[in-house]
Amino acid sequence: MGKGRAPCCDKNKVKRGPWSPQEDLTLITFIQKHGHHNWRSLPKLAGLMRCGKSCRLRWINYLRPDVKRGNFTEEEEDAIIHFHKTLGNKWSKIASFLPGRTDNEIKNVWNTHLKKRLSPNSSPSSSSSSISCTDHDDDKNCDTELQEERHSCQEDSPFSSHLQENCMHTEPELHEVNELHDIELLLEHEDFDDITSTFLETDDMLFQEQPLESFPQYHHQIDHIISTEFHNTCGATQEVTNEQSFDHPHQPDNIPCGVEETNQEFDLWTQLVESSSPTPTFSPNNDEEYNEWFNFIDNQTYFDDFTLVGQVCL
DNA sequence: AATATTGTCAACCGCCTATCT
DNA sequence: TAGATAGGCGGTTGACAATAT
């Protein structure tokens, strides 16, 4: 091997730059159908001319169903400032306290807004440099402080109550909701609005049932995606929920089908993907059709045997 | 109205770490 | 145990939009 690492992919053969709607749809559809066991091989299997890393990034930062969109609330910004004091530029760790927010997004917000907000008379680095654990090689201390932070979050949080709830994860999170029972529990919770408002835009409809018949032109494709083939792909011995084909934020990579990943299973996954019918290609004829389909996909976060039971908005 | 400047954020780069063989 | 590989992370870039001149 030559000096340095081999590139993860041949840069001459992969597309770069902004993702097209068509590519987004292809990626979403593929992951909905097969999950993602191996980012490197995923683009090839999905028929995308993209680097695996690019697919992963696009999925995690933009397409993943539980990504929260929209402006940061004051509570979230305060949280970022607070945790940045403790953790420094550990964006992924800070993101673990803010459900639905990605490290990339938090980093951008810090660099574009918060740094300036704090900087009029004090240098941006001063806040973090004063904390011992910002040293990158001191992760043990950081982890200790992180745990203390989580602990303090339960007792004496500097933030509002609903942020505490997010931090504590005591209530069912939306990305965990795939049972009507859970939804009912959520709806019954007295602070339901507070809880959901941290995940959803205010005007988003929760758990809005959307009949497949509304999209006759895509009925066949949709039906195909959520067909029993999904279950077959995941293996017959496991009780499978479609939720499990998605990333769970800030936890180890989701293992489709809820099984421990082994190489054998990865090989099996690859074989199944290759042997299964190709991921449907979507060719909306116009913007309207595209938007219709894309919105529908947005709403198709969780399925339960062909029945749409929940929505996590983008 | 045209141009320059500034702000925003998605995407890329390259390094580090964990895991596998 | 060492080398290879994939995933993850933080820093940076560049395209585009918004605002100022």
Image (cartoon, coloured by chain):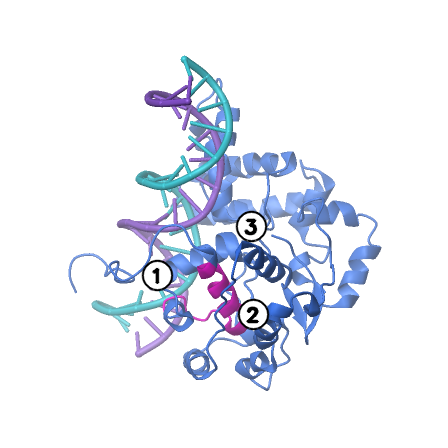
Chain colours: A blue, B purple, C cyan
Task: Tell which of A120 and A71 is nearer to you.
Answer: A71
Q: Position of residue A25 (x, y in %)?
A: 50, 62
- Host chain of mark 2: A
Q: Report the span colored magenta.
A: A22-40
CA gap between label 2 and label 3 equals 20 Å
Q: Secondary structure at mark 2?
A: helix
Q: Which quarter of the picture shows residue C11? A: top left
Q: Which residue is mark 3?
A: A96
Disc assigned to residue A209: none
Q: Is residue A241 above or below residue A14?
A: below
Q: Secondary structure at mark 1?
A: loop
Q: Residue at x 61, y 57 (%)?
A: A295
Q: Residue at x 68, y 59 (%)?
A: A311
Q: Which residue is mark 2?
A: A245
Q: Earlier in the sequence, mark 1 or mark 2?
A: 1
Q: Which quarter of the picture shows residue A81? A: top right
Q: Which quarter of the picture shows residue A202? A: top right
Q: Position of residue A19 (x, y in %)?
A: 42, 54
Disc assigned to residue A51: 1
Say whether mark 3 and mark 2 are on the same chain: yes
Q: Earlier in the sequence, mark 2 or mark 3?
A: 3
Q: What's the residue type where badge 1 is placed?
A: Cys
Queried whether the magenta region covers residue A32, the answer comes back as yes
